[in-house]
Structure formats: structure tokens, C-alpha cells
Image: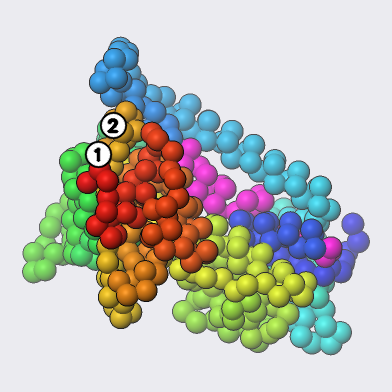
Amino acid sequence: MSEQQQFDVAFIGGGPGGYVAAIRAAQLGLKVAVVEKERLGGTCLHHGCIPSKSILRSAEIYRNAKEGEEFGVIAQSITFNFAQIQDRKRKVVDQLTKGIEGLFKKNKITVFEGFGRITGSPSVAPALGTISVKKANGEKETTLSAKNIIVATGSRPRSLPGLEIDGTYVMTSDEALEMHELPKSMIIIGGGVIGMEWASLLNDFGIEVTVIEFLPRILPLEDADISKDMTRVMKKRKVKIHTSTGVIAQSVKVVDGHVELEAKKGDQVLQFSAEKVLVSVGRQANSENIGLENTQVEVERGNIKVNEYFQTAEPNIYAIGDVIGGIQLAHVASHEGIVAVEHIAGKDPHPMDYLAVSKCTFTSPEVASVGMSEDEAKEKGHEVKVGKFQFRGIGKALVHGEVDGFVKIVADKNTNELLGVHMIGPHVTDMISEAGLAKVLKATPWEISHTIHPHPTLSEAVLEAALDVDGKAIHA
């Protein structure tokens, strides 16, 4: 490999934003390079989505095995081997990583292993940007140049100001995913998506879980009815939930092999203790130390500012995924990347419609949504009508023994526009794409209700909720 190569587009970061967009760019005939400091797949594949869902699946099977007697399946001395669970997780991650590497070879994408930093702007003559790549082993830096640069450096877990992450007693999800054994008790600071997924997972394994959320409700970005029902289910499962409660960071201390902390709820100071603490208070963009000072790229509160095609203040530098803030989800980063490279290739792509993005939480029961919540719709001036149907009225939910939850559809009362769909229940993360397609096609609840849903399936809850928007649910 020569010391410097030239490309049409170079990515800094090979996560779900960078690697997907790189493949699309290669399909469009562009010469592509990806700079990645670890392994292709990024945080999602190695420290987030895939490993956490792998452990969640093991927890689900363990819970189902314990509940088998209800189905006439009786097993003795049910237990789990966490080391084996971790080993399976690694195998899943390795298989997917090799798959991406194979796709890169197939599409002739050049990979530079190391930490990438922009050293020259593509807006400066001769209109080629430069990236230096520093390898972890101390080898001589490699330099590449490109007509276009796409920053896809992702994000990392955030902590509370003054709260030190030691990785052993006080950890983020990164460290939690690598635990060799499970604690007997865990305090989770933050009741958002990641926090509640861990609460569900640990509870399935029989761990004593306490969730402390600063805001008035858990899953605060979901519809209020979803948060309320998740709270009910989690409390039924003996998960302790404290909302409107703020952890006092300086109070966190390790005493005799466990963690003690204080949190304030109104004027009351509460005491908490557990073997370990998981800090899950959001993520912050990886926008530092990547050479943005050598460009005209604008950064606001750590997030790179972009336009609807993900161009920065420099037209030949783009940014996608978590590093631009917004909805920090893997599938969002992937689609943003596709829009960016198609814009580079002159394909005139449609800008992202973030109200058509499906969001999923892999708790038990699962949560999924697309579009506006009922409160958001009202705040935006819509007069709404709502349809709702409980899973306990669905035959397959009863067959599966999973009857908690519902489907809720929010529509405009005057125009019948579909504003939002919200689900909590069994396998709803696999069902939400119907609602996403309805949003893209601008379908109304009436049109959803005239789509024949097979019986017996869980998807019948969507049909009934769509009918209920106009008070016509059959099984209500």
C-alpha cells in the first residue's frame, strides 16, 4: 500500500452509519475508504445493539424456561451459565463482523485500521481533503486524501458531572457488557431505553434492580401511556423505580465491596445501596480530536451541525449518525449515510423524515413507536383521536402467554392523518415496521384497518387499534 492514496469518499468511522454508507457509495461506483480504530461494525456491533440483545435473548430463554410449567413443560433445576452466555455473545458478534469484512472485500472498499484525523480540508485547492491514520501499535502514520469526507465517529456513554466511572463498581453499558459474572443487586441511574433494557435483562436473571430516573417518568421519550404501562409491568416484576429523583454524584462511594449513594426527591434525601451501579444517562458525540479545527465545520454542544443532506459548513465534509445528535439509533445513522453518499453521487435523495423513524426498546415486554406521541400531537395543534387495543384480547398473545401491553394509534380528528403509533407488548419491535410503512405511504388508520391481517397473529392488535380510532374495534 502506498503511503498516500486518493479516494472519492473517505469515512472516519466504520459503525452502522459508516459501513452501510460505504457499501452504498461503492455500489454507486465511487472509490471508497473507511478509517476505523477498532473493528468494523462500531459501537452497535461490538459494545451496544448486538451484544446487549444477545444477552437479552439468553435472559428471555431463562425466564421462559422457569415459566414452562404453565405450558405443561416441566424442567428441574433450571439455571444459567453466564460465562457461556458471554461466549455465545462473542460468537454472534464475530460472525457479524466477518460478514461486514466480506462485504467490504466484495465491494472493493479499502480499510485503514487506526485513529483517523482530518489534517486538510477538501474545500482548499486542489479540492482534496486529507486524513492521517495513527495506528495503535505505533507504526508510521498513513495519510489518505479524498474529494469528500464523511465523519461517522459515533458516540460514547455519558456520565453525570462529578461521577467517576471506575468500570468495576460504577460502570456504563460498555463495561456491563463485559462482566464476568452478574451481581446480586444493581442500581441503574437513568430510566431511558438503555437503562430499562438492562433493568429487564437483570430482572430476568433474578438480580435485584433499582432504577433512579431524574425525569417524572421512565422511557420519557415515549408516549405517556407507554411509560405508565411499563412502570406497572416492571413494578409487578419487583423492579424498584424512583422517578423525579436526582442522584447526588458526590455521594457515590464504594464501601466494603458495594456501592452506596444518595438521591434527592423533592426535599427528601433517599439512601441507596447495591453491589454495582450502571450509569445510563445518555450518550455524547465523539467530535473531539478528529481534526475539525483544521476545517470550517461547526460544532454545537459537541454535535456537528449539518444540513438536510448532512453536509457541514464545508460542502465536501459530511457528518452522520450519533456525532450529529438527534435520534441516536443505528438504523438512523445507516439511512443518514445513504442520503449523504447519494447526495455526493448526484442522485438527489429524499431528505430524512424523522417522524417516520421507528424506535424500539428491547425490554420484556418490548416497546416500539413511530411518529408523534399523543401529547406531542396536541402540542403541535392537532385535534386528535385515539385508537387503542390490549394484547389480552388477541388470541396469539394468550397462546404465547404474553398478554401485557397494547397498541395505540394517534390520528388527526379532522384530516384522518396518521400521527403516531405506539406499542408495548410481545414482539412489537418486529411489528412496528407496518406503522413505519404507513407513515411513509401517508396511509390513514382507515386504510390500515382495511388491510387484512392474518389470524391468529399478534399483528391483529394493529388492526383492532386502527378500527378503534373510529370506535369500530371488533373485539373490544
User: Is the residue under label 2 in contact with that under label 1 (CB below 8 Å)?
Assistant: yes
* Residue 470 against residue 257 in the figure, above or below: below
Gap in angstroms between the C-alphas marked 1 and 2: 7 Å
The amino acid at mark 2 is Leu
Q: Quadrant of residue 445?
A: bottom left
Whether residue 207 appears in magenta in the rendering, the answer is: no
**Residue at 77% across, 50% down:** 104
The residue lying toward the viewer, choosing from 187 and 312, is: 312
The residue lying toward the viewer, choosing from 201 and 348, is: 348
Badge 2: few (under 14), some or many (20 or more) residues near its Cα, within 10 Å?
some
Residue 85: image location, x then y, percent? 46, 30
| Residue 300 left/right relative to 449 | right
Residue 82: image location, x then y, percent? 42, 29
Task: Using the rendered image of the protein, determine whether residue 256 is visible from the camera's viewpoint.
Answer: no
Q: Point out which mark residue 392 bears.
A: 1
| Residue 153 left/right relative to 1 | left
Residue 166: image location, x then y, percent? 39, 53
Task: Using the rendered image of the protein, determine whether residue 108 is visible from the camera's viewpoint.
Answer: yes
Q: Quadrant of residue 415?
A: bottom left
Specify start and end residues of the magenta stretch as a single range: 29-54
The amino acid at mark 1 is Arg
Residue 473: image location, x then y, percent? 27, 50
Element carrying mark 2: helix
Q: Residue furthest right?
A: 2
Q: Which residue is mark 2?
A: 398
